[in-house]
Amino acid sequence: MTKRFDPELLYVECTRCGQPLLWRAGETTKLLNMAGIDISGIDERCMLASDGCPSCQPDETQFSTQVIRLRKDPKPQQEEKPADA
């Protein structure tokens, strides 16, 4: 039996100020359902990015969000060499 990932465990971060965001219980699942995102495709490599938050935009009450899937195996970083090397 395959365990389903609980979307309420997704990390949520503001893309403007970098602040991690905490939402009410059930809010992530509600937003994903409203956006028509298939929750069965969400896993531990995903996160939510919010375009603003109450900390950096206190006059706003709604923010756009997007699901970001992080790469499983990041490419090894190549060492930068000076132009004259």
Image (spheres, helix red, strand yellow):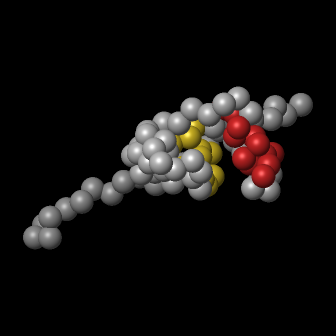
Q: Please say whether residue 25 is visible from this viewpoint.
A: yes
Horizontally, residue 57 falls left or right of residue 21, namely left
Along the line of sight, the residue nearer the viewer: 37 or 14: 14
Q: Position of residue 58 (x, y in %)?
A: 45, 44
Q: Quadrant of the C terminus?
A: bottom left
Q: Please say whether residue 41 is visible from this viewpoint.
A: no
Q: Residue at x 81, y 31 (%)?
A: 3
Residue reaching furthest to the left: 84
Relative to 62, is 12 above or below?
A: above
Residue reaching furthest to the front: 59
Label tally: 0
Q: Position of residue 51 (x, y in %)?
A: 51, 54
Horizontally, residue 19 falls left or right of residue 46, namely left
Horizontally, residue 27 falls left or right of residue 16, namely right
Snapshot quadrant of residue 4: top right
Residue reaching furthest to the right: 1
Q: Residue at x 59, y 51 (%)?
A: 62
Q: Position of residue 60 (x, y in %)?
A: 52, 50
Q: Position of residue 76 (x, y in %)?
A: 41, 52
Q: Residue at x 71, y 37 (%)?
A: 27
Q: Residue at x 48, y 36 (%)?
A: 20
Snapshot quadrant of residue 1: top right
Horizontally, residue 78 falls left or right of residue 84, namely right
Along the line of sight, the residue nearer the viewer: 41 or 52: 52
Relative to 66, is 25 above or below?
A: above
